Image (spheres, rainbow, N blue to C red):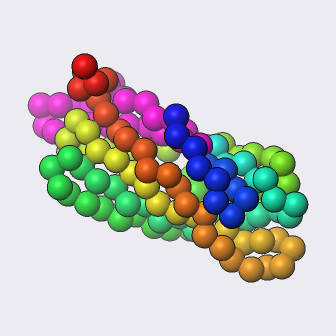
Amino acid sequence: MVSKISEGVEISVETFYQSDYSNPVNNEYMFAYRITIENHNSFSVKLLKRQWFIFDSNGEHREVDGEGVVGVQPIIKPNEQFQYVSGCNLRTEMGKMQGYYTMENQHRKETFTVKIPPFELIVPSKMN
């Protein structure tokens, strides 16, 4: 698991290889990731947008952005957390993701950026 605090918001990421949804013969590798967002600020924050940078080990690079996460724009109160699970497919057995969330300070109605730390996506058999 990797974690990073920026702008008073802690992002923790845990990854899982999804062998049942992968097809190595066709270079299709599916991964799931669990994100925990903890608000260490004295004000509530709203997650407005996400921006992901996805890298395969063959040099391919993708960007994914959109409103909210998993169809919601959660408001996270001080000292509370929000957790969700999502997924990513790769064309290789190894890759990485990183990005950021655009958040809104619910007290001042100002937006700010929270970094999502880089994390690796690796098929377990490649870890040896």
In this orientation, which residue lies closer to the viewer: 66 or 5?
5
Decide if residue 42 is in sight here: yes
The reply to whether residue 71 is in sight is: no
Question: Residue 65 appears at what percent x and percent y?
Answer: 45, 67
- Give the quadrant of residue 94: top left
Residue displayed at 35% across by 65% down: 63
| Residue 75 left/right relative to 62 | right
108 w.r.t. 8: above or below = below
- Estimate the x, y position of residue 16 in percent, counting from the top left: 43, 30
Q: Position of residue 124 (x, y in %)?
A: 31, 23
**Residue 57: image location, x then y, percent:** 20, 47
Which of the 4 quarters of the picture holds residue 95?
top left
Viewer-proximal residue among 77 and 41: 41
Magenta-span inclusion, residue 16: yes
Residue displayed at 30% across by 62% down: 62
Furthest residue in direction left, as rendered: 25
**Residue 127 or residue 23, whichever sits in front:** 127
Q: In this view, does 30 lie above or below 98?
A: above
Residue at the image position 47 percent from the left and 60 percent from the top: 99
Quadrant (top left, top right, bottom left, bottom right) of the C terminus: top left
Residue 50 painted magenta? no
The relative height of residue 113 versus residue 28 in the rendered view (above or below) is: below
Residue segment shown in magenta:
12-35
- At horizontal 13% and vertical 37% (from top left) the residue drawn is 26
In the displayed structure, does residue 35 sit left or right of residue 58? right
Total numbered circles: 0
